[in-house]
Image: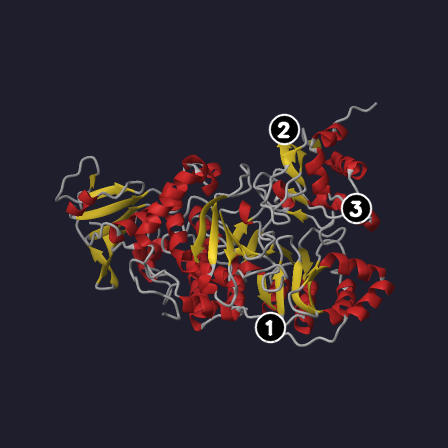
């Protein structure tokens, strides 16, 4: 993992001091609400429907057990005993008091963390593959590049006041688990960990969800790693200068790229880049290697062959077998596995975790996973390096505190934004919909029979629940003051080496009470029409939307 | 008499200076102080100005920062570069690092607070107009 230098440490401490002064001036009436809004947003603080919400940055979703324990303590001391894992790999607290936030930020700084640029119209926390550095299908670890971007984008003198928020995602694996196609900038890195200075990077620009979903355009192929920051600077400068500022719904870079055409945008970025290609921001090979060294694999011990034991345990414990099937991913090192701890169980909002659960995950990370934890954009915890011989022990402990759900990738492992219960932007509630679906389809055998289905729920057009890229997407809409839900099908965030695809809307939106029935009809069409072993997505791609449409909107006989 | 923040030999200070008679781009002639808007395209003729001011329409409008960078690094303008308009005490460090050497705060803003936060960090993660040295710990 990356380790803070004295420079990093003093930087975040100085930032806390500045924010403490800003908070005090606000409380003293010297800063207006509008002025303070801009300053607090850039330190992660929203004012929500019920209370402030503080979004803590978890850079590229990687945490140490020490950091996770500090988050558990914050959730106890300043919140109501829980935290929330967000779809951007961060952790959010829903009940902090505004006056306490400088102290919370100091508690974060004490464990080398911060909430800098987790909201506001600036470059946000860079996200990546939650299995980075562990996945068997990875060719190069994206995290050194993410850290390079984190540092470069922190309090950048020129790019803190953009037309709109700006999200960068990076991947280095065959399967894109970072959804690079639906980000303002997506980066796919080619190369290997031995020579990060020789890496080549494909740059996609102008992707995004929200009310105008669009896939990013490839604007630069095989950018040399040394040019990553100068090229990004050129791109950001074009966006900062020409992105629309008159209408916040047209201010994202996707609108600019579309207005200029991807070719026109690329030409403008290239022209700017020509001027700054050779500059102090050109990244020396030594810097790329220095960052790479922080992310060297841990010292994997030689593990005794656990396969026979594991097979026995799976035979004698049905639920453990299911958990291994769904929640355990192949690791690149012999004798190890990647474990996803699902936060999705009936009656708990997706991504919500109690202080005790957070502490438990920190303990298991120390016990089983070299003290390292990841947060996935599906709102689950990941332990990246678990010996196969310890899986059974971990599963038993996880089950005892409600983190043993064996549903990763299944219908009930849904992505869901906080929705109208918390968020002041939402048109409709999302959590009760998630819970109703989880209750209706709680039967494991049914879910298992359905196989892999991504169900994503957003409470409004802002698409924090990524509904556009759900195999089944649910969007809350407002119809004359009533909450309705629009269902889309066939989206995905990048699948089997294919780029992402946006879902198609089935038809008119439906009332909340009808959502579960509609989902059931959709699933029924799939079960009736699928070929053997054919996934929901595969079946949808083959038969198209019409059979689903007919079933959902059939007139009662 | 407006009070300003001015960078004098790498030291930011509060100074009392006379009003400049800023001329808008369409009225301006060489030898006069020029005020441009944040969406202007930098023009080499601007080098003939006695000073250049960039008018910030809002605290949140970062276009003036890019414009300052271009004036300093592309046109190699070395004269006074003044940030004015809707400028806020807590953003002066962005202005300072992007190449402004004079900052004029609007009515009601506190110069002393701005001076306190003109440089909130002892170091930064990027090279800038104010300090173009590379920042990488390991240099080739």
Q: Which mark is residue A231?
A: none
Q: Nearer the viewer, residue B45 or A41?
A: B45
Distance of label 1 from label 2 (alpha carbons) = 56 Å
The quadrant of the picture occupied by the N terminus of chain A is: bottom right
Is residue A243 at least partly visible in the picture? no
Q: Secondary structure at mark 2?
A: loop
Is A445 placed above or below A279 here?
A: above
Residue placed at 48% from the left, 70% from the top?
A4
Q: Nearer the viewer, residue A104 or A99?
A: A104
Q: Nearer the viewer, mark 3 or mark 2?
A: 3
Q: Which residue is mark 2?
A: A480
Disc 1 crowd, CA 10 A, few/some/many (<14, 14-19, 20+)? few
- What is the chain identity of the residue bearing mark 1? A
- What is the chain identity of the residue bearing mark 2? A
Tell whether label 2 touches label 3 (CB within 8 Å).
Answer: no
Work out whether disc 1 and disc 2 sit on a shared chain.
yes
Occupied quadrant, residue A381: bottom right
- What is the chain identity of the residue bearing mark 3? A
Residue A309 at what x, y percent from top left?
Answer: 81, 70
Residue A60 at what x, y percent from top left?
Answer: 55, 59
Q: Nearer the viewer, mark 1 or mark 3?
A: 1
Mark 3 or mark 2: name the one nearer the start of the chain: 3
Does residue A43 appear to the left or right of A409 in the view shown? Answer: left
Distance of label 1 from label 3 (alpha carbons) = 41 Å
Q: Which residue is mark 3?
A: A439
Residue A85 at what x, y percent from top left?
Answer: 63, 56
Q: Which residue is mark 1?
A: A298
Residue placed at 23% from the left, 49% from the top?
B75
Does residue A390 appear to the left or right of B54 in the view shown? Answer: right
Residue A99 at what x, y percent from top left?
Answer: 52, 58
Q: Nearer the viewer, residue A371 or A20?
A: A371
Disc 3 crowd, CA 10 A, few/some/many (<14, 14-19, 20+)? some
């Amino acid at each position: 993992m990356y380790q803070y230098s004295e420079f990093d440490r003093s930087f975040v401490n100085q930032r806390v001091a500045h924010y403490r002064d800003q908070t005090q001036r606000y409380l003293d009436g010297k800063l207006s609400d509008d002025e303070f809004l801009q300053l607090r947003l850039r330190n992660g603080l929203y004012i929500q429907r019920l209370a402030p919400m503080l979004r803590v940055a978890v850079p590229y979703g990687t945490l140490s057990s020490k950091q996770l324990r500090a988050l558990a303590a914050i959730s106890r001391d300043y919140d109501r005993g829980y935290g929330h894992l967000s779809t951007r790999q961060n952790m959010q607290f829903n009940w902090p008091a505004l006056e306490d936030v400088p102290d919370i930020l100091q508690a974060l700084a004490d464990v080398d963390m911060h909430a800098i640029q987790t909201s506001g119209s600036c470059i946000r926390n860079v996200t990546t593959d939650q299995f980075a550095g562990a996945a068997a299908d990875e060719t190069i670890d994206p995290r050194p590049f993410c850290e390079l971007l984190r540092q470069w984008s922190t309090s950048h003198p020129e790019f803190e006041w953009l037309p709109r928020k700006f999200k960068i995602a990076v991947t280095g694996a065959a399967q894109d688990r970072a959804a690079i196609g639906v980000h303002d900038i997506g980066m796919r890195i080619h190369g290997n960990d031995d020579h990060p200075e020789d890496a080549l990077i494909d740059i996609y620009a102008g992707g995004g969800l929200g009310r105008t979903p669009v896939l990013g355009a490839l604007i630069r192929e095989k950018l040399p790693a040394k040019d990553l920051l100068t090229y990004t600077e050129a791109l950001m400068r074009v966006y900062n200068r020409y992105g629309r500022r008159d209408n916040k719904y047209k201010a994202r870079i996707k609108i600019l790229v579309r207005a200029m055409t991807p070719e026109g945008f690329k030409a403008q970025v290239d022209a700017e880049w020509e001027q700054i290609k050779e500059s102090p921001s050109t990244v020396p090979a030594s810097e790329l290697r220095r960052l790479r060294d922080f992310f060297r694999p841990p010292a994997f011990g030689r593990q005794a062959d656990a396969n026979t034991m594991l097979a026995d345990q799976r035979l004698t414990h049905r639920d453990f077998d299911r958990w291994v099937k769904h929640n355990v991913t192949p690791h690149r090192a012999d004798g190890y596995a990647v474990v996803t701890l699902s936060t999705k169980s009936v009656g708990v909002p997706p991504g919500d975790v109690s202080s005790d659960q957070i502490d438990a995950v920190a303990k298991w990370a120390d016990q089983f996973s070299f003290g390292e934890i990841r947060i996935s954009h599906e709102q689950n915890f990941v332990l990246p390096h678990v010996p196969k011989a310890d899986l059974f022990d971990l599963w038993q402990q996880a089950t005892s505190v409600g983190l043993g759900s064996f549903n990763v990738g299944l219908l009930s492992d849904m992505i869901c934004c906080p929705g109208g219960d918390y968020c002041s932007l939402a048109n409709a509630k999302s959590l009760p919909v998630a819970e109703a679906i989880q209750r209706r389809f709680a039967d494991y055998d049914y879910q298992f029979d359905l196989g892999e289905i991504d169900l994503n729920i957003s409470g409004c057009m802002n698409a924090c629940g990524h509904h556009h890229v759900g195999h089944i997407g649910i969007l809350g809409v407002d119809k004359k003051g009533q909450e309705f839900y629009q269902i889309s099908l066939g989206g995905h965030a990048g699948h089997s080496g294919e780029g992402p695809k946006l879902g198609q809307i089935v038809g008119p939106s439906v009332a909340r009470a009808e959502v579960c029935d509609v989902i059931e009809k959709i699933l029924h069409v799939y079960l009736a029409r699928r070929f053997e072993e054919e996934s929901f997505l595969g079946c949808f791609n083959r038969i198209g939307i019409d059979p689903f449409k007919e079933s959902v909107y059939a007139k009662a006989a | 008499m407006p009070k300003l923040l001015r960078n004098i030999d790498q030291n930011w200070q509060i100074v009392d200076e006379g009003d400049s008679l800023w001329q808008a781009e369409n009225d301006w002639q060489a030898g006069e102080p020029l005020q441009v808007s944040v969406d202007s395209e930098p023009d080499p003729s601007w080098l003939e100005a006695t000073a250049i001011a960039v008018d910030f329409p809002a605290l949140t409008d970062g276009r003036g920062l890019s414009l300052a960078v271009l004036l300093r690094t592309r046109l190699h303008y070395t004269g006074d570069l003044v940030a004015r308009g809707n400028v806020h005490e807590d953003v002066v460090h962005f202005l300072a690092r992007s190449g402004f050497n004079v900052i004029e705060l609007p009515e009601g803003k506190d110069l002393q607070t701005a001076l306190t936060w003109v440089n909130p960090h002892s170091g930064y993660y990027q090279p800038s107009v104010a300090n173009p040295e590379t920042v990488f710990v390991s240099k080739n």
